[in-house]
Amino acid sequence: MSAMHFYEPAAGHGLAHDPFNAIVGPRPIGWVSTRGADGGVNLAPYSFFNAFNYIPPIIGFASTGPKNSLRNVQETGEFVWNLATRRLAEQMNATSASVPYGVDEFELAGLEKAPSRLVAPPRVAASPVHFECKLADIVQLKSAAGVPVSTWLVLGEVVGVHIDHALLKDGVFDTFGAEIILRAGGATAYAAIGPEARFDMVRPK
């Protein structure tokens, strides 16, 4: 076995950049649009995001700190997930800017809004896939010692799905054709899924 770098997170990693995010990856991006009780709209990307259940479909994102998306979901109980693609990468990145509450990141990034069918928050019109979500739960995370940390896991049931017809090939979603982008660790790294990355395996019976 080759030499291993070992560290205890509580004592620091001793590296140029925390490797945790880079190791757990590439990670899907939770590009989340919300609307507050006052009608204000927010759009922000979350790199701690994933799917957690099939039936009903449940997705979730983690807000490290009480950010605007969390506030809006707490107030209205709804959000929309918008698929981030290579074509939309720069605009997605623009929506990560730290701006005061009430600033519309759609306008900041030059993105057009599209109305949702079942929830109030708008969709990113240029995104090829959207999940309209109703709040299922908000969980404040705790350490192993039971101490609450300043991170909230927001879980939403997907109640409506929009998919661009161009990405449905014989009834199967074209993951590789969508050019989905993922967070790939470090301060700046991203990855795009393309056909060259594909390989297939059959599950054992």
Image (spheres, rainbow, N blue to C red):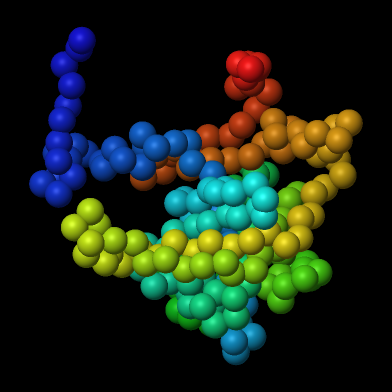
Q: Nearer the viewer, residue 191 or 77?
A: 77
Q: Residue at x 81, y 39 (%)?
A: 167
In percent of width and height, residue 49 lies at 50, 51
In percent of width and height, residue 6 lies at 15, 30
Q: Residue at x 63, y 17 (%)?
A: 205
In the depicted structure, whether residue 157 falls above or below residue 9: below
Q: Is residue 4 left or right of residue 101?
A: left
Q: Quadrant of the N terminus?
A: top left
Q: Residue furthest left?
A: 11
In the depicted structure, whether residue 194 falls above or below residue 76: above
Q: Residue at x 64, y 85 (%)?
A: 39
In percent of width and height, residue 3 lies at 16, 16
Q: Residue furthest top?
A: 1
In the depicted structure, whether residue 49 falls above or below residue 205: below
Q: Residue at x 67, y 36 (%)?
A: 179
In percent of width and height, residue 149 lies at 27, 64
Q: Is residue 125 left or right of residue 6?
A: right
Which of the 4 image quarters holds residue 75?
Answer: bottom right
